[in-house]
Image: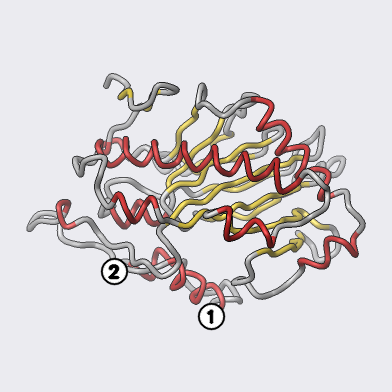
């Protein structure tokens, strides 16, 4: 299948029948300097004194900015993260860290550039599904953007460690920029983990749960994990894009018929957060599984 050209900056290979769930995007129009400064701002934040970072620590997943750590064995952290909303910037940036001094400006420029890429990608995918690029245009334009900034330590000598356990992202698309390799995606056909190559300044894109719902299962969410890097610590910035907090995502009626009935219940990002809070012990099914009819 020939690539679909949908932007002056990049091209997309897409076929709903092949269930593509990951993409690599180059020539995306975000300058290398904007990306480098965002990675540097993230790195400088994680180097701040613990008491400065702890100002953003919270167990409340609805906080506009939240800092935290996760651990493999309860003693050594396998990931440190900072999560904050990023659209609209005029509403959310005031809650972001003021240290390092360049964080708001540098991360703001990166967030705005990534959001533009996400909207252009969504138009192409919607066209590929036969829905037309303007399908639910207002909902996507007014949608939510959550930026998850991660710092993974260097892998301990002689050990193999998981930085983030296997999962899928809620939202339509996640766009990732990383300082070095460490992302693995589950290959559904062979049930094996595939290492994602991370060329410098390329963006990795994977499909989230909302896209699987809207497409009625024609496009599958990407199950992925993060592994610690042998040679160096890793910075990654994942930009997750969805409808607004309380806007419901449902199966596109155009993709439903007698042979292909509706497979998912509707839900919102707020419903997803509620599910996470009620599923803190991680023993129940995933949120996407709970939506299957």
Q: How far apart are labels 1 and 2 at the CA level?
A: 18 Å
Judge the density around disc 2: few (<14), some (14-19), many (≥20) Cα neighbours within 10 Å.
some
Question: Does residue 156 sit above or below 201 in this rendering?
Answer: below
Q: Residue at x 73, y 41 (%)?
A: 235
Quarter of the figure that contains the N terminus: top left
Residue 84: % across, % down:
63, 58
Mark 1, secondary structure of its residue: helix
Q: Which residue in the structure is indicated by mark 1? A: 278
Report the front residue among 132 and 1. 132
Q: Residue at the top extreme? A: 2
Quarter of the figure that contains the C terminus: bottom left
Q: Residue at the left extreme? A: 258
Q: Residue at x 52, y 53 (%)?
A: 145
Q: Residue at x 53, y 80 (%)?
A: 278
Residue 89: % across, % down:
58, 53
Residue 286: % across, % down:
47, 66
- Would residue 59 be found to the left or right of residue 239 on screen? right
Residue 59: % across, % down:
69, 74
Task: Determine the image quadrant of residue 201.
Answer: top right
* Image marks 1 and 2: residues in contact by CB distance under 8 Å: no
Mark 2, secondary structure of its residue: loop
Q: Which mark is residue 265?
A: 2
């Amino acid at each position: 299948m020939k690539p679909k050209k949908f932007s002056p900056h990049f091209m997309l290979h897409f076929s709903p029948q092949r269930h593509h769930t990951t993409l690599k995007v180059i020539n995306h129009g975000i300058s290398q300097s904007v990306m480098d400064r965002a990675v540097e701002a993230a790195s400088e934040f994680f180097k701040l004194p613990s008491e400065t970072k702890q100002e953003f620590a919270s167990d409340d997943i609805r906080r506009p900015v939240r800092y935290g750590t996760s651990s493999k064995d309860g003693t050594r952290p396998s990931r440190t993260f900072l999560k904050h909303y990023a659209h609209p910037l005029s509403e959310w940036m005031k809650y972001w860290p003021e240290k390092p001094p360049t964080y708001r400006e540098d991360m703001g420029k990166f967030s705005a550039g990534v959001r533009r890429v996400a909207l252009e990608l969504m138009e192409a995918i919607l066209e590929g599904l036969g829905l037309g690029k303007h399908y639910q245009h207002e909902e996507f334009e007014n949608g939510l953007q959550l930026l998850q900034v991660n710092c993974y330590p260097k892998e301990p000598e002689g050990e193999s460690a998981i930085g983030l356990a296997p999962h899928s992202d809620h939202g339509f698309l996640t766009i990732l920029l990383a300082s070095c390799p460490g992302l693995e995606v589950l290959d559904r056909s062979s049930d094996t983990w595939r290492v994602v190559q991370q060329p410098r300044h390329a963006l990795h894109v994977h499909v989230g749960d909302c896209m699987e719902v809207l497409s009625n299962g024609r496009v599958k969410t990407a199950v992925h994990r993060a592994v610690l890097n042998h040679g160096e610590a890793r910075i990654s910035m994942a930009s997750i894009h969805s409808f607004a907090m309380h806007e419901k995502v449902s199966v596109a009626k155009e993709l439903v018929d007698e042979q292909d009935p509706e497979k998912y219940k509707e839900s919102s990002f707020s419903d997803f957060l509620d599910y996470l809070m009620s599923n803190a012990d991680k023993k129940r099914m995933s949120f996407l599984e709970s939506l299957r009819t």
